[in-house]
Amino acid sequence: MPSAYTILFIILAIAALLTWIVPAGQYDKTADGQPIPGTYALTEPNQQGVGDILTASIKGFYEAADVALFILMVGGFLGVVMETGAITAGIKNIIAKLSGKETLLIPILMVLFGLGGTTFGMWEETIAFFPLLIPVFLAAGFDTMTAVAVILLGAGAGVLCSTVNPFATGIASGFAGVSMGDGILVRLLQLVLFEGAAIWYVMSYAKKVKADPSKSLGSRETGTDMDESDTGGKRKLTGRDKITLALFVLTFLIMIYSVIPFSDLGLTAIPTLGWWFDELSALFLVSGVVIGLAGGLKEERLVDCFVSGAGELLSVALIIAVSRGITVIMNEGLITDTVLSFGEGILSSLSSKVFGFFVFLLYLLLSVFIPSTSGLAALSIPIMAPLGDFANVARSVIITAFQSASGIVNLITPTGAVVMGALTLGRIPYDRWIRFSWKYVVGALVVSALLIWVIS
């Protein structure tokens, strides 16, 4: 499978070719730039050439600069937080305190990983925890499948039910032109349901394996030189760690509060901040500095960690630019409205619920070929959100359908570095992971489809 960049560049070239084939046309627009149904009319074509293809991603970066900068600020913030070691120390401390009661680790750790997934898209970051947790679960009489599932399903359920995840909800909301708070109550309900189901699923398997090891789908050995006697509890949680963790949690609480449209919910007694990417970028910048100082980092080290953390997410910012370049080509080639008009014609015979269901199915397919959630959001949301308007489906529903489908595919895709890396560390063949997880994945798929049907 080619990388997401290659796939998007191919789509970019195809979009330019289509400007020579697809008739050009435009809708009349509202004051905020939204197309008015029934006003589409043909216009003079503006075919896109080689030069337009080469500059499209640059223009796309300009158009998505606020989203890209927000991603870089989140990356810098996470770089500083991880450098303090507070998160790793917190998990090690929990492991040490529950020595002898390792079964309780399953719900506690899965809730923590789920919170990380739903708030800051904790997925690639989980790789650091496999060497820590696999020996712990082996020493407690479980197998490697239990440890791998705690992390993958714990964080994966959180990502699937993203509430304010900047890499899924944030980017999609930005391109849809709505607040991240739109639809957050539905996604919170989804989070409780899916995370709870994942915890029950893993605990049921763990108890079965501990009672009868012959039922194990995992291994009793690791794929590395991990010390199975090491519980990881050698470092105590210091006062600095506690302050750092408190500030970390406070940052996301502020973020959640700032994006919820209380006034739209009829809660006029609670001030609506209405923050957007400018304010949110500043929040993570300031929080990164404050956490670094609270964590005892020297000024030079703090700056280096922030820049390094931002650099690790530069690829996300670049993929947003490439994806947005496709929209630029279609807009300047005057075929975006033609696609919307085609969709409007089809949707005129569909109910809103049927449309929402088909959007979910479409994103399941697209997520296989474009595993990057940020790239998929930047590529598709500018088209799907206006189509939702035509079908009387709220844009927040389109976002929920997108991240639910992407999150489900993310749990089992063989092209995912996290899934395959985790299975390698746990010495678990890919087919055994499918045998273990398929019931949860199918259940998540069915429930997500029903949820989209109900809220459409």
Image: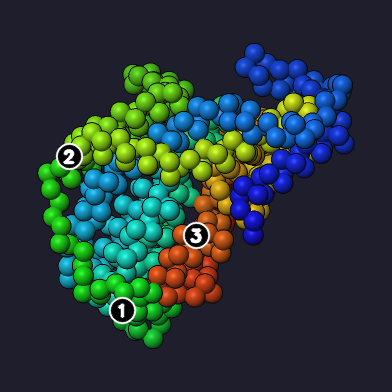
Q: Quadrant of the N terminus?
A: bottom right
Badge number at residue 417: 3
In this rendering, the label closer to the viewer, 2 or 3: 2
Badge number at residue 210: 1
Q: Nearer the viewer, residue 219 or 225?
A: 225
* Whether residue 220 is situated above or below residue 327 in the rendered picture: below
Q: Is residue 262 visible?
A: no
How many angstroms separate mark 2 from mark 3 (CA)? 33 Å
Residue 201, percent from left and from top: 41, 65
| Residue at which label 2 appears | 296
* Whether residue 202 is situated above or below residue 47 in the rendered picture: below
CA neighbours of label 2 inside 10 A, class few (<14), some (14 to 19), many (20+): some
The amino acid pointed to by label 2 is: Gly
Q: What residue is drawn where x is 48% and y is 35%?
A: 170
Q: Is residue 152 visible?
A: yes
- Where disc 1 sits, the SS reads helix
Using residue 170 as the reference point, say whether residue 21 is left or right of it: right
